[in-house]
Amino acid sequence: MTDLKLLALDAEDLDVISATTQDAIVRVGDMGYAQRDKRFALLMNRYAWESGGKTGQRKRTALHFDRVQSARTTGINMESVEGVLELLAIRFAPEGDEPSGVIELSFAGGGTVRLEVECLEARMQDLGAAWAAKLKPEHTA
């Protein structure tokens, strides 16, 4: 399977990254905000929805957001570095003077990361080989 490398410069692009990273597993210690660099980054084990099949695969993936003015979390204990989160969705909403806005990462259980950005600039890249997923994520309607 080919590694994915995606760039998002608008909400529509970010929707593609959101769909691609839905159900990714993120360790709390693998995400953080570098205020001086204006960058929020995270590593994840994403479920490779594009692989198809009954068993599915996971891939180690990096995602970062540039031009971040501030980062706030709610419902996430950032001191629990071994804590595990399941990413549900990533959304962008314009706010104030365009192209500024807010990126929100929503996690299962109600946790969120809220990034205030000068503009939307996100990059996602797979980092290596895939492995068999133990379970395929399921969603109830």
Image (tube, rainbow, N blue to C red):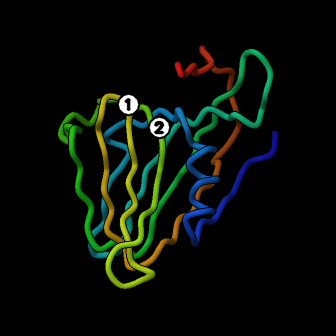
Residue shown at 71% from the left, 23% from the top: 56
Please state, as top left, top right, bottom left or bottom right, where the N terminus lies in the image: top right
For residue 95, what is the image quadrant? Answer: bottom left
Q: Are marks 2 and 1 in contact (CB under 8 Å)?
A: yes
Label ID, residue 108: 1
- How packed mark 2 is, by other alpha carbons closer than 10 Å (few <14, some 14-19, many 20 or more), is some
* Residue 98 spot, x, y in % from top left: 42, 83
Left or right of 26? Residue 113 is left
* Residue 132 spot, x, y in % from top left: 68, 21
Residue shown at 76% from the left, 15% from the top: 54
* Residue 108 spot, x, y in % from top left: 38, 30
Q: Which residue is at the far bottom? A: 97
Up the image or down, 139 lies above or below 102; here it is: above
Label ID, residue 88: 2
Up the image or down, 128 lies above or below 117; here it is: above
Residue shown at 70% from the left, 34% from the top: 49
* Mark pair 2, 1: CA separation: 6 Å
Q: Amino acid at mark 2?
A: Leu
SS for dot 1: helix
Q: Amino acid at mark 1?
A: Ala
Q: Nearer the viewer, residue 106 or 93?
A: 93
Q: Nearer the viewer, residue 61 or 76?
A: 76
* Mark 2 or mark 1: whose residue is earlier in sequence: 2
* Residue 25 spot, x, y in % from top left: 47, 32
SS for dot 2: strand
For residue 33, what is the image quadrant? Answer: bottom left
